[in-house]
Image (cartoon, rainbow, N blue to C red):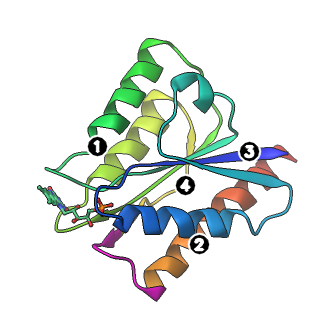
Amino acid sequence: MLKVLIFYFSRTGNTEKMARAVAEGARTVEGVEVEMKYQTTPEELAGFDAIIIGTPTYHHDMSADMKNLLEETAVKNINLEDKIGAAFGSYGWSGEAPKLVLEILKIKFRMHSIEPPLIIKYEPDEKGLASCRELGKKVSEQLRSFKS
Ligand SMILES: Cc1cc2nc3c(=O)[nH]c(=O)nc-3n(C[C@H](O)[C@H](O)[C@H](O)COP(=O)(O)O)c2cc1C
């Protein structure tokens, strides 16, 4: 079974709604197991084939939890090379957090990034949720074609 992780943070629930829809989309592909987590460790990250990170933008930045995890993963030299990486998140006016995360996954951890990051203003509507499902499905499909 190929394993996809959706690791996310959400303070007021908007990114969480996105995360649930991303998971739904990712689960439509056969042979892929999808887990959603609100907390994880660098060692756990290494056990997944694809990592999708969800973070809202607060103060032009990603959440502190997300930053700590990425930092700890780098310090511990956890190898994420060649895994698939994607990012998404809700925002209000600038929305840079998912872009920052994806850049780190791609450049620092040498993962295959799915571009562009998906950002949605405040609460996702039906169209937004459909884009989230599409992102999840795309990650699972790429993983399947990549690993076969
Ligand atoms: C204190 C505060 C700071 C914020 N800073 C930003 C920001 O710098 N850029 C931006 O695009 N949105 C900003 N926002 C808006 C949030 O990203 C937006 O409300 C988002 O939907 C929150 O997602 P969540 O429900 O997943 O926590 C901020 C909101 C608050 C309350």
Marks 4/2: CA–CA distance: 14 Å
Residue 3 tag number: 3
How many neighbours does mark 3 have within 10 angstroms: few (below 14), some (14-19), or many (20 or more)?
some
Q: Which residue is mark 2?
A: 133
Marks 4/1: CA–CA distance: 21 Å
Residue drawn at point x = 33 percent, y = 76 percent: 123
Q: Earlier in the sequence, mark 2 or mark 3?
A: 3
Query: Where on the image, by quarter, is ligand 1?
Result: bottom left
Residue drawn at point x = 44 percent, y = 33 percent: 107
Q: Amino acid at mark 1?
A: Ser
Looking at mark 4, is its residue's CB closer than 8 Å to ligand 1? Answer: no
Q: Amino acid at mark 3?
A: Lys
Residue 137 visible in this rendered orientation of the protein: no
Residue drawn at point x = 54 percent, y = 80 percent: 130
- Disc 1 is placed on an element classified as loop
Marks 2/1: CA–CA distance: 23 Å
> Is 96 rendered above or below residue 111?
below
Residue 63 tag number: 1
Q: Position of residue 78 (x, y in %)?
A: 56, 18
Q: Earlier in the sequence, mark 4 or mark 2?
A: 4
- Disc 4 is placed on an element classified as loop
Q: Earlier in the sequence, mark 3 or mark 1?
A: 3
Tell me whether circle 4 and circle 2 mark residues in contact (CB < 8 Å). no
Q: Which residues are magenta?
A: 120-126
Marks 4/3: CA–CA distance: 16 Å
Q: Amino acid at mark 4?
A: Ile
Tell me whether circle 3 and circle 1 mark residues in contact (CB < 8 Å). no
Q: Earlier in the sequence, mark 4 or mark 1?
A: 1
Q: Which residue is mark 4?
A: 114
Tell me whether circle 4 and circle 3 mark residues in contact (CB < 8 Å). no
